[in-house]
Image: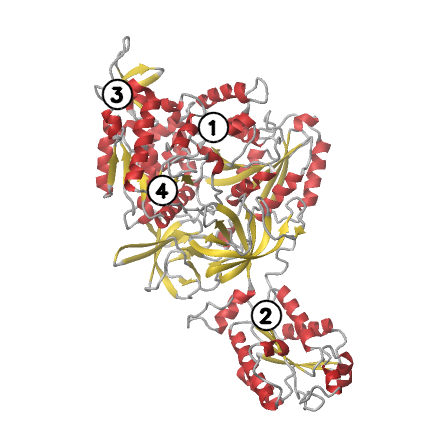
C-alpha cells in the first residue's frame, strides 16, 4: 500500500497513532440520571478534558452560555450536548444524543438520555446499543426513584456493566460518609440485577474531580477515575461465545454462478466447511465461501458484515436465520416477551401491529398482557392496555413462525420492534423471554430432523410416563405435580389426561370394552408422536387392561416406556371419590366402571410402583429420583431464569 | 478486493471494523427495504467513504441504486472531474441534478449570500430531484459528531411528504432494527456514517486507500482572504473586491462545498499521514470552514427542518 511508504516519511508520533488506531476498540455507554444530576455537564466534561471541544465550538458555547446558561459566568458544559433549540431554551435534554470522544485506548460512543419519567422510551433506546451504563446521582439527594428505574431498565435491556457516578460531591464537602451511604444503598437494591461489573465513583463533573483526573479533595477514594474505568473495563463479548447466528438481510446474485447470503453475524463464529441450517425448514448445507465485507476469509465472527455461499442450492431469502446444526434457535409463532410501549396511543391486545425481528417483518397481536411492571418498585400490576413508557410482560401471536433466541441469551436475535400499521410509527420495543409451548415443535417438516435431533435441541431425553390405576387413585394429581417440577427444571412436557382426551380426540368413544381399547390405542399413538417430538409425555389413564398397556409399551423404543402403577386400594379411592363417580355407581347411575363391574388388571412388573400414596408431592419426587437414577433426566441450564422480574 | 484483517489476536472488533460492519448493515437494510433508494454523492471525503462501503456491502455485485449529485454549478472544478471519474471507475449510474429555475434567476453565492444560495441551489434542488425520480430513501454521509443537531438524528431519519424533519417527533430507534415504513410521498434519509468521527474517516481512508479529491491535500493554490476565510479562486466568477489581492499559498481543505463558501486552511500536509498529524493538533472543527454554519448556532437545525441534508 502506498500509505506504508508514506508513513516512513512522517514522524514517529503519527506512525504510533496510526498503529494504535488499528487495535483501538469501541465502548458504547449511556448516561442516565434525574433532571439535575448533571448528565450533560458530565459528558461535556469528558469531551472538554479529552480535548474534543474545538475552539469554534468553544466560542459558540461561550455565546450560548450567556444566552441560555445556568451556571452564571462560567462556561456551561451542558450546552455542548443539549443540541436542539427547545432543549437549550428549557435547559433540559429531550432526546437521545450521541456524542463521541476517544483516548489512546478506546473510542467512546455516548448516548445521553433524559431522566424524566415521560422519556423512558429514550433511555431504552440509548440502552439498547450500550455496553455499559453510567447512573448519575446527586450526592445531596442520594438515590431517587429514577435511579431505581434506570438500573431496572438498564438491566432489562441487557446491560451488564454499570457505574454509579455520585456527582456534585463538592456540594457535600467531598464527604466519604455520604458517598458510602449512597453506595451501600445502591448495592442493596441492585443486588438482584445481573450486572457483571459495578463501580461507584465520587465525582464533580462541574470541576472535573475524578472524571478524568484524580481528585485531590478526596484522598480517601482509591478507586479509578471515570475515564480510567471506561478505558479499562472488560466488556466481554457475550455474543462471541453464543452459538452462530446469521440473519439473512440480502441475497446477493450478480450472476448465475454466485448466490450469496449477506448479513451481520449476530453471534458466534463461522468457518468455511461448517454445517449451517436454515431455522424453520431445517435444510442443512455447508459453508463454501466467506466474504467479510468484500474480502475472502476462512472464518468470520460476531459483529462482522459477511456474505456466505453454500455448497447446496437451498431456498433461503431475506428474513431467514442461519445457525449451526448443534445449537439452533427457537422457531415459533407465539412467544412471551417484555414490551416497552413508546407511543401516545395505548397498546391494545388483539390489535394488529407489524413486528420486525432482525430482517423479518410479520404481523403480530398481543394476545394477553400477563402483567405490567412498575418500573420504580418492580412490582407486577394487572392491566388491560399499555400506555406510553409502560413496560409489560405479554404473550404475542404472530402471523407466521419466526426464528429467535431468548433476549437474555442473544440481544440481536431476541429483540423486536412493533410498528403501527396506520401511522408507520415505531410504537413498541420488545425482548423475547421464551417461546410459548403450544407453538413449539410444529414447524419441523424436514426429513433430516429426527427424534434424536429434536430431543437434543430440547436438551432432554423423551420418555412416556404411563400412569395406571383405579379412578381416584391420584394419577392426575401426581402427574400434574410432576409436570410442574419438570417444567421448572426447563423440561418440555405434556400431560395426556383421560378425561381431557375424551373431550376432543376420543369424543366419539364410550365405555364399552371395544371403545376402551380404541381409547388406549389412540392415546398410545399420540404419546408416540410426542415422544418423537422429543417431549416428556405424562399419560394419566386408568388403562385397566394389560394387553393395551403392552401395546403402548411396544410402540415406544426400548427404555422409553415407564409404567407407573398408582396402587391405591379400592376402599381409599371410594372414600376420596374426587369426581363423585363412585357415588354415582352406588346409585346405579353408572355401569362398566373399573374396579366395580369392570375388571382392572394390575401391572405385574411396573417400573415404578407407588403404594398407598398419601402425599402426591412425595410420589412425584419418587418418580424424579427414578428418572435421575436411570440417566433419563439431565440437569437443566435454565433453572431460575428471570427470578427477579 | 481488499485484504481482510484477521481479528484472531484481538478479542473485540476494532473500532474501525465495528464501524465498517455497522455501516454495511445499514446500507444493505436500506437496499432491501426500499423500492427506490438513491445515494447522495457530494464528492467529499465522507461521500467517498460511504460509496466505498456501498461497494463492499454488495460485492461482487454493484450497489443496487444510483448516485445523485446535486450540482449547484459552484463546485470546485477538481470535484466535478473527480466525480465523473469515480462514477466511471466504479461503473455506477450517476444522476446530476441542478435547479434550473435557480440558474435562470442567476442565483449565486457571491451576490445572494450563503443562505439564499444554499436554500435554492442545494435544499430546493435536492427536493426537486427526489420528487422527480420518486426516491423513497436517500443515503447521506452526515455524521453525528459534525454538529449538535446532528447528534440527535436517527440513522433512518423520517421526512414528511414535503421533506421536512421534525426533531421532536423522531421514531425511536433501538438495537439495529430500523423502521423503514413510509407512506406514499414520504421518505427516509439514511445515514450509514452516523457513528463515525472525522478521525475515523481519515483513518479509514488511509487504511483502505480510498481515492480523494486532491483538494484535501496541501498544494500551492491561488487564494484571497475574505470575511476571515481563505477563498480559493477556482474560476473567474469570483470578482475581487477593492483591497483584496490574490496570493499563492500552500493550502488544503478540510471540507468541500461551493468554492466561494468554503474556507481553506494554510497547510503543508500533502499526504494522508501528514493530514492526520495536523488533525491531531487541530484546534478548530472541520465545519468551521463553512460559511453556511456561521449565521447562528442553531442554523443547522433550521436548515434540516426545511429539508437540507
Closer to the camera: disc 3 or disc 1?
1
Closer to the camera: disc 4 or disc 2?
4
Task: Name the mark on residue A32.
Answer: none
Image point (50%, 69%), residue name: A454
B139 sits to left or right of B104: right
Crowding near pointer 4: few (<14 within 10 Å), some, many (20+)? some
User: Disc 1 marks which residue?
Assistant: A52
> Distance between the Cα atoms at labels 3 and 1?
30 Å
| Labels 4 and 2 positioned on one and the same chain | no
Q: Give the colour scheme of this rendering.
A: secondary structure
The reply to whether residue A642 is visible in this rendering is yes
Closer to the camera: disc 4 or disc 3?
4
User: Disc 4 marks which residue?
Assistant: B185
- Is A617 rendered above or below residue A89? below
- Is B51 rendered above or below residue A260? above
Image point (26%, 21%), residue name: B220
**Mark found first going from the N terminus, 2 or 1:** 1
Q: Are marks 4 and 3 in contact (CB under 8 Å)?
A: no
Q: Image quarter for residue A184?
A: top right
Relative depth, front residue between B61 and A94: A94
Task: Name the mark on residue B220.
Answer: 3
The reply to whether residue B262 is visible in this rendering is no
Label 1 marks a residue whose chain is A
Label 3 marks a residue whose chain is B
Amino acid at each position: 500500500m502506498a500509505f506504508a511508504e508514506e508513513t516512513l516519511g512522517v514522524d514517529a508520533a503519527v506512525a504510533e497513532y496510526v498503529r494504535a488506531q488499528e487495535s483501538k476498540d469501541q465502548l458504547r455507554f449511556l448516561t442516565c440520571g434525574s433532571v439535575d444530576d448533571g448528565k450533560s455537564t458530565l459528558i461535556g466534561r469528558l469531551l472538554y478534558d479529552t480535548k474534543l471541544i474545538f475552539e469554534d465550538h468553544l466560542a459558540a458555547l461561550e455565546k450560548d452560555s450567556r444566552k441560555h446558561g445556568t451556571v452564571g459566568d462560567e462556561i456551561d458544559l451542558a450546552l455542548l450536548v443539549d443540541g436542539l433549540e427547545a432543549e437549550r431554551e428549557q435547559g433540559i435534554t429531550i432526546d437521545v444524543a450521541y456524542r463521541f470522544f476517544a483516548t489512546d485506548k478506546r473510542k467512546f460512543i455516548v448516548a445521553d438520555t433524559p431522566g424524566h419519567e415521560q422519556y423512558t422510551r429514550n433511555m431504552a433506546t440509548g440502552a439498547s446499543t450500550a455496553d455499559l451504563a453510567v447512573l448519575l446521582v446527586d450526592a445531596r439527594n442520594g438515590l431517587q426513584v429514577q435511579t431505581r428505574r434506570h438500573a431496572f431498565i438498564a438491566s432489562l435491556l441487557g446491560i451488564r456493566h454499570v457505574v454509579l457516578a455520585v456527582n456534585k460531591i463538592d456540594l457535600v464537602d467531598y464527604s466519604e460518609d455520604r458517598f458510602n451511604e449512597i453506595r451501600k444503598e445502591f448495592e442493596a437494591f441492585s443486588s438482584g440485577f445481573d450486572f457483571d461489573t459495578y463501580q461507584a465513583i465520587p465525582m464533580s463533573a462541574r470541576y472535573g474531580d475524578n472524571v478524568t483526573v484524580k481528585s485531590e479533595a478526596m484522598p480517601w477514594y482509591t478507586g479509578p477515575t471515570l475515564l480510567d474505568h471506561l478505558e479499562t473495563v472488560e466488556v466481554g463479548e457475550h455474543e462471541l461465545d453464543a452459538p452462530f447466528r446469521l440473519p439473512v438481510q440480502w441475497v446477493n446474485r450478480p450472476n448465475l454462478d454466485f448466490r450469496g447470503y449477506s448479513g451481520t453475524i449476530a453471534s458466534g463464529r463461522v468457518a468455511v466447511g461448517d454445517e449451517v441450517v436454515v431455522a424453520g425448514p431445517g435444510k442443512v448445507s455447508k459453508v463454501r465461501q466467506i466474504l467479510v465485507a468484500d474480502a475472502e476469509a476462512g472464518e468470520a465472527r460476531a459483529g462482522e458484515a459477511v456474505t456466505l455461499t453454500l455448497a447446496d442450492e437451498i431456498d433461503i431469502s431475506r428474513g431467514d436465520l442461519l445457525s449451526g446444526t448443534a445449537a439452533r434457535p427457537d422457531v415459533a409463532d407465539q412467544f412471551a416477551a417484555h414490551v416497552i410501549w413508546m407511543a401516545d396511543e395505548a397498546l391494545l391486545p388483539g390489535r394488529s401491529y407489524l413486528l420486525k425481528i432482525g430482517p423479518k417483518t410479520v404481523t403480530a397481536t398481543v394476545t394477553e398482557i400477563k402483567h405490567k411492571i412498575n418500573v420504580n418498585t418492580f412490582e407486577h400490576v394487572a392491566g388491560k392496555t399499555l400506555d406510553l413508557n409502560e413496560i409489560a410482560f405479554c404473550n404475542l401471536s404472530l402471523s407466521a413462525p419466526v426464528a429467535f433466541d431468548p433476549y437474555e441469551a442473544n440481544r440481536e436475535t431476541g429483540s423486536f420492534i412493533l410498528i403501527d400499521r396506520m401511522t408507520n410509527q415505531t410504537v413498541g420495543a420488545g425482548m423475547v423471554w421464551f417461546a410459548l409451548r403450544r407453538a413449539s415443535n410444529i414447524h419441523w417438516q424436514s426429513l433430516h430432523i429426527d427424534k434424536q435431533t429434536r430431543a437434543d435441541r430440547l436438551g432432554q431425553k423423551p420418555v412416556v410416563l404411563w400412569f395406571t390405576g383405579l379412578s381416584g387413585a391420584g394419577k392426575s394429581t401426581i402427574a400434574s405435580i410432576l409436570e410442574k417440577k419438570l417444567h421448572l427444571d426447563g423440561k418440555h412436557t405434556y400431560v395426556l389426561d383421560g378425561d381431557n382426551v375424551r373431550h376432543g380426540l376420543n369424543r366419539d368413544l364410550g365405555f364399552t370394552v371395544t371403545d376402551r381399547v380404541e381409547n388406549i390405542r389412540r392415546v398410545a399413538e399420540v404419546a408416540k408422536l410426542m415422544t418423537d417430538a422429543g417431549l416428556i409425555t405424562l399419560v394419566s389413564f386408568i388403562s385397566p387392561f394389560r394387553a393395551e398397556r403392552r401395546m403402548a409399551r411396544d410402540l415406544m423404543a426400548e427404555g422409553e416406556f415407564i409404567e407407573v402403577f398408582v396402587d391405591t386400594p379400592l376402599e381409599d379411592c371410594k372414600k376420596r371419590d374426587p369426581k363423585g363417580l363412585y357415588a354415582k355407581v352406588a346409585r346405579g347411575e353408572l355401569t362398566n366402571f373399573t374396579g366395580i363391574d369392570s375388571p382392572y388388571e394390575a401391572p405385574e412388573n411396573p417400573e415404578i410402583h407407588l403404594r398407598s400414596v398419601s402425599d402426591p408431592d412425595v410420589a412425584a419426587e419418587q418418580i424424579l429420583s427414578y428418572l435421575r437414577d436411570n440417566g433419563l433426566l439431565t440437569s437443566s441450564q435454565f433453572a431460575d431464569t428471570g427470578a427477579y422480574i | 478486493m481488499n485484504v481482510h484483517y484477521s481479528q484472531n489476536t484481538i478479542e473485540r472488533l476494532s473500532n474501525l471494523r465495528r464501524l465498517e460492519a455497522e455501516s454495511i448493515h445499514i446500507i444493505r437494510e436500506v437496499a432491501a427495504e426500499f423500492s427506490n433508494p438513491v445515494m447522495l454523492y457530494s464528492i467529499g471525503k465522507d461521500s467517498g467513504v460511504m460509496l466505498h462501503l456501498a461497494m463492499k456491502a454488495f460485492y461482487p455485485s454493484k450497489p443496487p441504486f444510483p448516485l445523485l449529485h446535486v450540482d449547484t454549478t459552484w463546485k470546485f472544478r477538481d470535484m466535478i472531474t473527480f466525480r465523473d471519474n469515480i462514477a466511471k471507475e466504479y461503473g455506477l449510474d450517476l444522476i446530476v441534478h441542478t435547479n434550473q429555475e435557480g440558474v435562470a434567476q442567476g442565483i449565486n453565492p457571491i451576490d445572494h449570500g450563503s443562505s439564499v444560495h444554499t436554500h435554492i441551489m442545494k435544499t430546493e434542488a435536492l427536493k426537486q430531484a427526489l420528487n422527480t425520480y420518486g426516491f423513497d430513501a436517500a443515503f447521506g454521509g452526515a455524521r453525528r459528531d459534525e454538529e449538535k443537531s446532528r447528534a440527535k438524528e436517527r440513522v433512518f431519519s423520517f421526512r414528511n411528504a414535503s421533506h421536512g424533519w421534525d426533531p421532536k417527533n423522531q421514531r425511536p430507534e433501538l438495537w439495529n432494527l430500523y423502521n423503514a415504513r413510509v407512506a406514499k410521498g414520504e421518505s427516509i434519509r439514511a445515514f450509514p456514517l452516523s457513528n463515525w468521527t472525522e478521525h475515523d474517516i481519515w483513518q479509514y481512508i488511509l487504511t483502505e486507500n480510498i481515492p480523494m479529491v486532491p483538494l484535501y491535500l496541501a498544494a500551492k493554490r491561488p487564494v484571497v482572504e475574505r470575511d476571515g476565510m481563505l477563498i480559493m479562486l477556482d474560476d473567474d466568477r469570483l470578482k475581487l473586491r477593492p483591497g483584496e489581492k490574490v496570493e499563492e499559498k500552500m493550502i488544503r481543505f478540510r471540507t468541500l462545498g461551493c468554492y466561494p463558501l468554503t474556507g481553506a486552511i494554510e497547510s503543508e500536509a500533502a499526504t494522508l499521514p501528514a493530514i492526520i498529524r495536523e488533525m491531531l493538533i487541530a484546534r478548530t472543527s472541520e465545519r468551521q470552514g463553512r460559511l453556511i454554519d456561521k449565521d447562528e448556532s442553531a442554523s443547522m437545525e433550521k436548515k434540516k427542518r426545511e429539508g437540507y441534508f
